Amino acid sequence: MAENTAIPALVQSQRDFFKTGGTLSVKWRKQQLRKLLDAVCKYEKPLFDALWKDLHKSEPESYLCETSIVKGEIRSAIKHLDRWAKPKRIATPITHFPACSHIVYEPLGTTLIIAPWNYPVNLLLNPLIGAISAGCTAVLKPSPYVPTVSGVLQLMIEETFPKEYVAIVQGHREVNTELLAQRWDFIFFTGSPALGRVVAAAAAPNLTPMVLELGGKSPCIVGPDANLKIAAKRIAWGKTLNSGQTCIAPDYLLLHKDIKDAFVAEFKKAVESLHGADVRQSTHYVRMVTDKAYQRVKSYLKEGKILAGGAYNDAERYIEPTLLDNVALDSDVMTTEIFGPVFPIITYETNEEVLEFVNARQKPLAFYYFGKVKDGNYLLEHTSSGGACINDTIMHFANANMPFGGVGNSGQGKYHERETFLAFSHTRSVLNTSSRIDLPFRYMPYKAIGLMKMILR
């Protein structure tokens, strides 16, 4: 760990190491990826234990949502990195003869990765995979709100890599401030839109490129012809996963008026099938991360009529999955990203009402529709979001073959597998012109312009 007073020296040491060219070899990068894979395997059980202690996150959920994703991404990077990093031949117009064109992928340099607390392993290490794959150095900043997990990650990183290559820095917002005051070649940030603006402002003086993975209020629409049993189960799973503390969790429900009561009944059944009759006793139900988060989400219970759930326990920071009806559109629960297991309900009659409601708000990170695919596609065509699912929730993130990212208020840039490699790389265009022939087309006084026009016609 580095104290914030040592941060400038740490960044300079990484910049000096990068300048040596030691990270450029693809063979060397793959060796570092294998070291990271071995480290994750070695520390997997301590990470599981830490996730349980900090978040009450079960081992199966920690495996599915944290370590399995990281290990899969590392293995994919090792398998495909030679192809990803290989220069790519590009077509060259006849007007450029005698020349050939290609693009090369060069590492951006010294990078900063700031991770949140909700998926503290996945969202710290997946960007690191991209940094290593691209040939960058990295300073990692885990969240202080999951201190046990962050401590295990520190042990793992410091045992695996020299700090001039990959380092980890602990601390609260004053440390973030010090980190963001440095000049970086790239910043990867995952967190709230409010903090994303802080990062963007800090990056602006140096025009530092960024990926911002943010969030927002992701709508979940249930149409009149949806399979309510499946819809309720998949929505209940997406909302109770990590107790709703997921950036792509469905935030609020738009239910067609004809199916509202039936959906509520199916949602109750689905929660019980997932977590048992007493959700509080479920070993797979996560707690709110801090007292502040707990009090904020708990306060939403007063902002509508409770149709399902509503129980809570202050000592455990436990809030039962809750459906809220009769919520005011200007209430906190409808204007703030909930990031918890409370689900406000709005009813609608037509798809045009849905479009008006969704498009009147900031672009969300995710968009969910349950019902006929043609209706889902119609709504997708007339809205914008970072990603989307028709008849599912969350699972688009789990498909590593698709890029993941936000748009507008929900973020910028994207990652996952090759996209992560590209995020930490500069795509450099190179034109190689032969000096054996020198055609006169481009030179003043443009005597061959007539022939040029014939060629370009």
Image: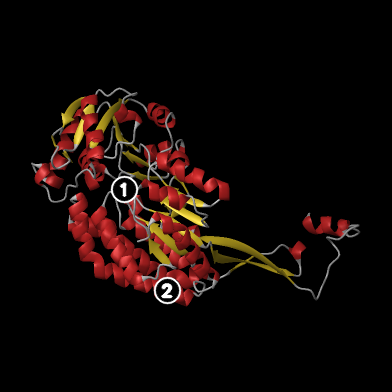
Residue 136 seen from this side? no
Amino acid bearing label 1:
Ile
Q: Which residue is mark 2?
A: 30
> Is disc 2 placed on a helix, strand or loop?
helix
Image quarter (top left, top right, bottom left or bottom right) of the N terminus: bottom left
Q: Tell me which corner region of the image, top left, top right, bottom left or bottom right, holds residue 103.
A: bottom right
Q: Is residue 126 left or right of residue 155?
A: right
Colour pattern of the rendering: secondary structure
> Is disc 1 placed on a helix, strand or loop?
loop
Q: CA distance from mark 2 to mark 1?
A: 30 Å
* Residue depicted at 80% across the width and 76% down the height: 436
Q: Position of residue 386 (x, y in %)?
A: 42, 44
Q: Position of residue 216 (x, y in %)?
A: 37, 38
Q: Nearer the viewer, residue 185 or 88?
A: 185
* Residue depicted at 21% across the width and 29% down the height: 301
Amino acid bearing label 2:
Lys
Q: Is residue 87 above or below residue 410?
A: below
> For residue 394, which numbered disc appears in the image?
1
Q: Position of residue 164 (x, y in %)?
A: 44, 68
How busy is the neighbourhood of tag 2: few (under 14 within 10 Å), some, or many (20 plus)?
Answer: many
Q: Tell me which corner region of the image, top left, top right, bottom left or bottom right, holds residue 399.
A: bottom left
> For residue 291, which numbered disc appears in the image?
none
The tag earlier along the polypeptide, 2 or 1, is 2
Residue 339 seen from this side? yes
* Residue depicted at 63% across the width and 63% down the height: 429
* Residue depicted at 38% across the width and 26% down the height: 353
Q: Position of residue 273 (x, y in %)?
A: 13, 45
Q: Nearer the viewer, residue 51 or 169?
A: 169
How busy is the neighbourhood of tag 1: few (under 14 within 10 Å), some, or many (20 plus)?
Answer: many
Front tag of 2 and 1: 2
